[in-house]
Image: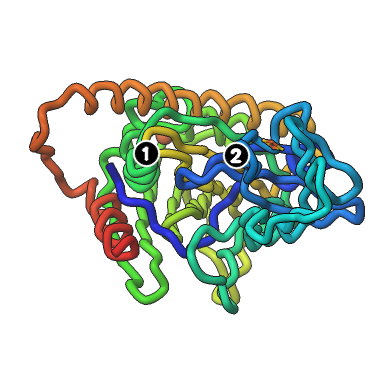
Amino acid sequence: MTAFVRNQWYVAAYAREVGREPLGRTLLDEPILLYRTEDGRPVALSDRCVHRRYPLSQAPSRLVGDRIQCGYHGFTYGTDGVCTYVPGQQRIPRTARLTAYPVVEQDSFVWVWIGDGEPGGLLPPRAPWLDSPEYTVVSGMEPIDCDYGLLVDNLLDLSHETYLHGGYIGTPEVAETPITTTVDEEAGVVHVSRHMDDAECPPFYANSTGIQGRITRWQDIEYHAPCLYLLHSRVAPVGSPPPNADGTDPHAFHVEVVYAITPSTGRHTYDFWAVARDFALDDREVTEFLHKNNHTVVMQDVDALNVLQKALDTEKPGYQELSINIDTGGLAARRLLARMAR
Ligand code: FES
Ligand SMILES: [Fe+2]
C-alpha cells in the first residue's frame, strides 16, 4: 500500500457540496464531518461523537445554529469541537471535545489539513482556473476502490490515453511521443511534459474547439504531491505560431485539467476531476459535451483501477513490476511520496 503523507492539505469536497446539511468524508482513515456556519464559513470536525462514537454526519444528527447535535443522545459541539451540552447533567467532561481540523476554501475546493501539528503559514497549492471568470469549468468526483498510488501512477503516465481512452482523448501520438520528467524535490512537484508537433485531433478537442485537421498538442503536467495534479493542455492547428514571449498565446486553445487525489482509506480514493477551458466560454453545448466526454474518460480510469486493484490483491507478496521510459514520472512521484511519508 502507498503510505499516507500526513501534515498536508487535502481536498475534502467541492465548496458547493458543503452547506447546511452535514457531510461525511473519510480522509487518510480519519472520519470527518463538514458543514457551513450560518455566515458561510466551512467547518471540519471529527465525525465521531465522543460519547458512543455515533457519526455526526448521519441523521438524526443535525445542525442547531452553528452547532452540531449528535442524533443518538444529544451531545452538542461548537465549531471549535468543544462540547457545549450533555444530557442529564450540568458538568461537561473536560475531554468532551472533537478534533477541529484547519480548513481553507480556495479555487472551488474545501481543503482540510490532515496532520498532527498546525499548517503554520503553509497554504494549499493553487488551481485558480476553477473559479476564474476567464474559464468555464466542468467537474465531478468519483470514488475508486483502490490505493491512491494507483491513481497517481495513472495520471502521471498519459501514454495510457492511447489505449484506455482511444476514441475520446487518446490518439497514437500520445503513446509514441517521449516524455521529459523533472522533479523539484524542495517544492515536492513532479513535472512531466509531452509535446506532440503534429498529431491527430481526438474527438474531445475536435468537438470542443472546432479544429478540423491535425494539431500541435502539448501536455505539461505538474503534480503537487500528494493531492493536486494539474495538466496544462495546449492545442492548436499545426503551423500555428507558438506562445509569445510574454506568455500570451492567442492562437491556441487551452484546457486546464485538474485532479485532486485524496486518499480515503488504503483501498478507497476520492478522484476529484475538473476541466477548465479558455474558449467557447458561454457555449452550453460545448460545456455539456466536455462534461459528458470527460466523465466517460474518468469512468474508464475508475473501472480499470478497480479491476487492477482486485488483481493486485490476489498477487503473492513480492511480485515484480517491469518499468519502462513512460513510467519515469510515476516512479518519480512514488519516490517523492515515500520520502514525504517518512
Ligand atoms: S453517541 Fe453521541 S450522544 Fe451518545
Ligand atoms: Fe486516464
The quadrant of the rendered image in which ligand 1 is seen is top right
Which residue occupies 44% across, 52% down?
A: 218
Which residue occupies 50% across, 54% down?
A: 228
Which residue occupies 76% across, 46% down?
A: 35
Q: Secondary structure at mark 2?
A: strand
Percent across and percent down for residue 177 are 28, 46
Q: Is residue 171 above or below residue 250?
A: above
Name the foreground residue: 30 vs 228. 30
Q: How is the image coloured?
A: rainbow
How busy is the neighbourhood of tag 1: few (under 14 within 10 Å), some, or many (20 plus)?
A: some
Q: Is 53 on the left-hand or right-hand side of 1?
A: right
Q: Is residue 301 above or below residue 128?
A: above
Q: Are marks 1 and 2 in contact (CB under 8 Å)?
A: no
Q: Which residue bears the numbered disc 2? A: 25
Percent across and percent down for residue 113 are 57, 60
Percent across and percent down for residue 300 are 44, 24
